[in-house]
Amino acid sequence: QVQLVESGGGLVRPGGSLRLSCAASGLTFSSATMGWFRQAPGKEREFVATISWSGGYTSTADSVKGRFTISRDNVKNTVYLQMNSLKPEDTAVYYCAADPQGKARLRIGVTPYKYDYWGQGTQVTVSS
């Protein structure tokens, strides 16, 4: 079965950096569109970043543009989210998501509904 396991979350001061990792198994990773989403308490899950199956195309939300970078390693079956210049409003549970049909359907989604599999989430807290 498909498994997505996030790691790298934690407590960081404003202005600091974290790198999240998501290790994937049970799917053809090099054919999957991968995404990062986040959900703060009392809010809906929101798009953060997505990357195409080859890594040749990426997209990030306006709220994190210029601060967050998504990347992937198709040998290690891992997707990353480098987060710099963190702000308190970045505090949330961060989720990794996979669309195994991304390459087959030429699909790169920015909504949760485009993704079939989700990790358990990792908490990121930005606070002084």
Image (cartoon, helix red, strand yellow):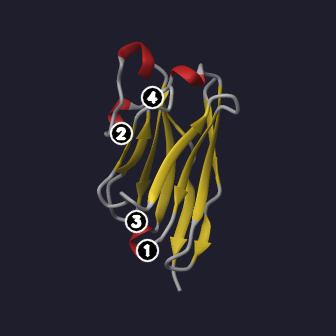
Q: Secondary structure at mark 2?
A: helix
Residue 16, horizontal then vertical, whole percent: 55, 74
Residue at point 34%, 33% (across, down)? 109
Name the residue beneath numbered marker 2: 112
* Viewer-side label of 2, 3: 2
Name the residue beneath numbered marker 3: 41
Residue at point 51%, 26% (across, down)? 54
91 and 20: which one is in front? 20
Q: Secondary structure at mark 1?
A: loop
Name the residue beneath numbered marker 4: 116
User: Disc 4 to disc 2, how far (Cα)?
Assistant: 9 Å
Q: Which mark is residue 17?
A: none
Left or right of residue 27, residue 48 in this image: left
Density class for disc 1 (Cα within 10 Å; few <14, some 14-19, many ≥20) is: some
Residue 102, horizontal then vertical, whole percent: 42, 22
116 and 64: which one is in front? 64
Residue at point 69%, 28% (across, down)? 75
Name the residue beneath numbered marker 1: 87
User: Disc 4 to disc 3, how far (Cα)?
Assistant: 23 Å
Density class for disc 4 (Cα within 10 Å; few <14, some 14-19, many ≥20) is: few
Identity, as a three-letter code, of the amino acid under mark 1:
Lys
* Viewer-side label of 2, 1: 1
N-terminal-most mark, 1 or 4: 1
